[in-house]
């Protein structure tokens, strides 16, 4: 367990490129350095096309980096096998997606328990407690289609915390919400992360959200590939 | 919640296609089990020596026809042999029991067999088990027009002790062929679950004296009259049912009667004669088996298709599961488990189908031959088919499972930015 203040996530010289339809390699992520302390909450401003989701997927181990290192909670993600990254993701990370990515055939409670299935193990009581914490104790047996957008978002937050993660990644978590609900949702995410001691790496392009964080970064500056794209000077390798 | 929960949910989400696939697997499993089990049981029933006799002596001709006619009461008689031949074989030291049969009449399509009381006093159709008459019944008096009715016939025709009937001439029922003679039922047999249950037994003398019957034991026509005994030289029998002292006796009698003699045929051993019939019609069972295998392959294909068709809509689901930490092998296993579950449920349904098919076969075979198939008799197909189908189902699941395995998480979760 990382001590508060200790480095939880350390990204060094991270590069990721994809093949474009015409066969060219497009450099999408080129982050020389990024670090996050345990329990810290950081907002990253990422405009569309800045590689923010790719960056988060690299941190989550969903994508394999071409070069560079990612050290998460003492584990070098970039050196791990795919199944190793899967295991680490299940035990260390929570992920809140912009479109929530809830499984439609499952109830709110089951969605949260699914989050536990591959991590700490299914604990229905804890899952209910998490839903209660996000204000959905009366909707545990509802399916996503029976919930409002805001409620779905809260289920996604509860699911992200299901495995007692050390780091929660949030990709435009309020992107589908109106301003009032966005504010409430953000406050909830930050609060539950703080309560559980999880660090938060949140990506958004909403200035109001960015302004509410003590530390906010601009991905265009962090990600040299994005900067190059913005300047129209490259990206292709 | 575990991997099986994911499978259950998927089956529920795709309830219609899952149901159709389970039914098709059930039909395939049921059909396959039925083909094998019915094949095995009919083979056993007709060749397994449950008939109680070792050999049949009859007119020169086909051994198979002789056996079918006398043991299974099917087919026509190949002809008659003189009574003297019966007496001769009955006195042979190699023969422990010889019972004459005379056939040629029926009642409502059920065969009437003229025989001697020894059929009910000495004959055993299974080790230590002879024909048992129901309470209140007795063996017929050889000199009277009395009958003992097989259990199945009695049930079908509503005959009981005291019932009377008039035999009809020939082995096929025809209203115009009614004999004047009226027979009284003196006993109903307990079930033997064999061909004898479909027979009405009367004294052999009754066959000789049946109105319209003539005897040609001497080569000339003789019409028995009521006031005199039928001379032995005029008597004929359709066949003599034999129990032999040992297999060597059968071998020697076979030499004497079939290879050196010219007037009679010895059908021996009965099981071998029937096995030859099965060998001859073996192609039917081979075709049925091939059809069953084909249906199994089609069912496996339907499993593959039904799961594969859901793969596109489930790519996002797999991506989400992967994002939550599920490994590739986990989603792969979930699909294989789903395919196996479908086949397992189908196999369970297969037992219901098997029960249905076997019940129908039970009724048909019993009605046609009197032979009772044992629905509960264990056949290796009853475990090999379900296990084989589950393995085949799992195999069919490998293709969609591999597709799930290869699901790209990032691109299926959201657009790259």
Image: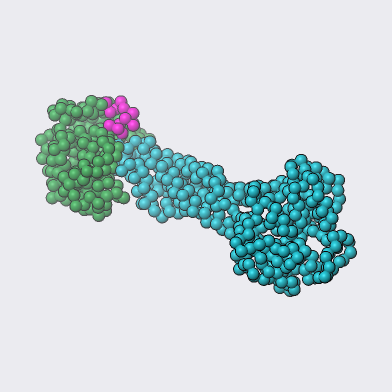
Is residue B158 toward the left or the right of residue B256 in the image?
left
Where residue A135 appears, as percent x and y from the top left, is: 16, 48
Q: Residue at x 40, y 46 (%)?
A: B311
Where residue A44 appears, as percent x and y from the top left, is: 18, 36
Is residue A128 toward the left or the right of residue A18 in the image?
left
Judge whether residue A87 is colored magenta. Answer: yes
Chain coloured green in this rendering: A
- In the foreground, A176 or B336: B336
Please identify which colour was used for chain B in the image.
cyan
Is residue A83 toward the left or the right of residue B53 in the image?
left
Q: Residue at x 51, y 49 (%)?
A: B29
Residue B5 shows up from this direction: yes
Query: In which quadrant is the N terminus of chain A drawn?
Result: top left
Segment tinted magenta in the rendering: A76-88
Query: In which quadrant is the C terminus of chain A drawn?
Result: top left
Type of secondary structure dominating the magenta stretch? helix
Q: Residue at x 79, y 51 (%)?
A: B90
Where residue A74 appears, as percent x and y from the top left, is: 23, 25
- In the foreground, B349 or B118: B118
**Vertical position of residue A34 compared to residue A20: above or below:** above
Where residue B224 appears, as percent x and y from the top left, is: 83, 68
Residue B28 shows up from this direction: no
Judge whether residue B313 is colored magenta. Answer: no
- In the foreground, A137 or B275: B275
Residue B79 placement: quadrant: bottom right
Q: Residue at x 13, y 37 (%)?
A: A194
Is residue B121 toward the left or the right of residue B4 in the image?
right
């Amino acid at each position: 367990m990382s001590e508060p203040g200790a480095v939880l996530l350390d990204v060094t010289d991270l590069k990721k490129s994809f093949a474009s339809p015409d066969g060219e390699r497009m450099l999408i992520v080129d982050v020389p350095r990024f670090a996050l302390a345990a329990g810290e909450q950081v907002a990253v401003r990422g405009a569309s096309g800045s590689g923010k989701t790719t960056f988060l997927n690299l941190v989550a181990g969903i994508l394999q980096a071409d070069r560079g290192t990612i050290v998460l909670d003492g584990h070098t993600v970039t050196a791990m096998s795919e199944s190793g990254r899967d295991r680490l993701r299940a035990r260390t990370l929570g992920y809140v997606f912009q479109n929530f990515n809830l499984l439609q055939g499952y109830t709110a409670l089951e969605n949260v328990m699914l989050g536990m299935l591959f991590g700490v193990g299914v604990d229905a009581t804890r899952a209910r407690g998490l839903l209660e914490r996000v204000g959905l104790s009366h909707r545990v047996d509802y399916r996503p289609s029976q919930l409002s957008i805001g409620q779905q978002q809260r289920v996604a937050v509860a699911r992200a915390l299901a495995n007692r993660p050390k780091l929660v990644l949030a990709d435009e978590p309020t992107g589908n919400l109106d301003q009032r609900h966005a504010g409430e949702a953000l406050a909830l995410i930050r609060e539950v992360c703080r309560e559980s001691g999880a660090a938060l790496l949140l990506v958004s392009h909403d200035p109001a959200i960015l302004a509410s964080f003590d530390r906010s970064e601009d991905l265009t500056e962090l990600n040299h590939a994005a900067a190059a794209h913005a300047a129209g000077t490259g990206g292709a390798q | 919640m575990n991997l099986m929960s994911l499978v259950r949910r998927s089956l529920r989400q795709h309830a219609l296609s899952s149901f159709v696939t389970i039914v098709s697997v059930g039909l395939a499993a049921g059909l396959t089990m039925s083909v094998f089990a019915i094949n095995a049981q009919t083979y056993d029933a007709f060749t397994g020596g449950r008939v109680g006799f070792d050999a049949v002596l009859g007119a020169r001709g086909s051994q198979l026809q002789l056996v079918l006619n006398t043991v299974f009461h099917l087919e026509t008689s190949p002809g008659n042999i003189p009574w003297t031949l019966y007496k001769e074989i009955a006195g042979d030291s190699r023969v422990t029991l010889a019972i004459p049969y005379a056939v040629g009449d029926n009642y409502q399509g059920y065969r009437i067999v003229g025989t001697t009381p020894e059929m009910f006093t000495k004959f055993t159709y299974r080790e230590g088990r002879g024909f048992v008459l129901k309470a209140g019944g007795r063996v017929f008096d050889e000199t009277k027009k009395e009958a003992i009715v097989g259990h199945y016939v009695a049930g079908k025709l509503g005959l009981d002790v005291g019932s009377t009937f008039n035999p009809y001439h020939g082995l096929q029922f025809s209203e115009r062929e009614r004999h004047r003679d009226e027979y009284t039922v003196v006993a109903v047999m307990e079930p033997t679950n064999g061909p004898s249950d479909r027979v009405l037994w009367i004294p052999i003398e009754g066959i000789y004296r049946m109105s319209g019957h003539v005897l040609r034991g001497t080569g000339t026509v003789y019409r028995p009259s009521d006031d005199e005994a039928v001379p032995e030289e005029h008597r004929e029998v359709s066949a003599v049912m034999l129990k032999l002292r040992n297999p060597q006796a059968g071998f020697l009698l076979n030499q004497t009667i079939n290879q050196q003699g010219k007037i009679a045929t010895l059908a021996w051993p009965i099981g071998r004669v029937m096995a030859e019939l099965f060998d001859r019609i073996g192609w039917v069972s081979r075709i049925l088996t091939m059809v069953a295998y084909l249906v199994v392959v089609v069912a496996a294909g339907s499993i593959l298709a039904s799961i594969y068709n859901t793969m596109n809509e489930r790519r996002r689901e797999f991506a989400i599961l992967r994002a939550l930490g599920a490994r590739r092998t986990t989603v792969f296993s979930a699909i294989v488990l789903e395919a196996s579950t479908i086949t397992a449920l189908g196999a369970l349904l297969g037992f219901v189908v098997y029960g249905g098919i076997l019940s129908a076969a039970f009724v048909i075979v019993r009605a046609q031959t009197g032979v009772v198939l044992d629905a509960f008799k264990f056949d290796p197909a009853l475990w090999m088919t379900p296990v084989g189908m589950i393995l085949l189902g799992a195999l069919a699941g490998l293709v969609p499972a591999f597709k799930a395995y290869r699901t790209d998480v990032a691109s299926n979760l959201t657009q790259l930015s």
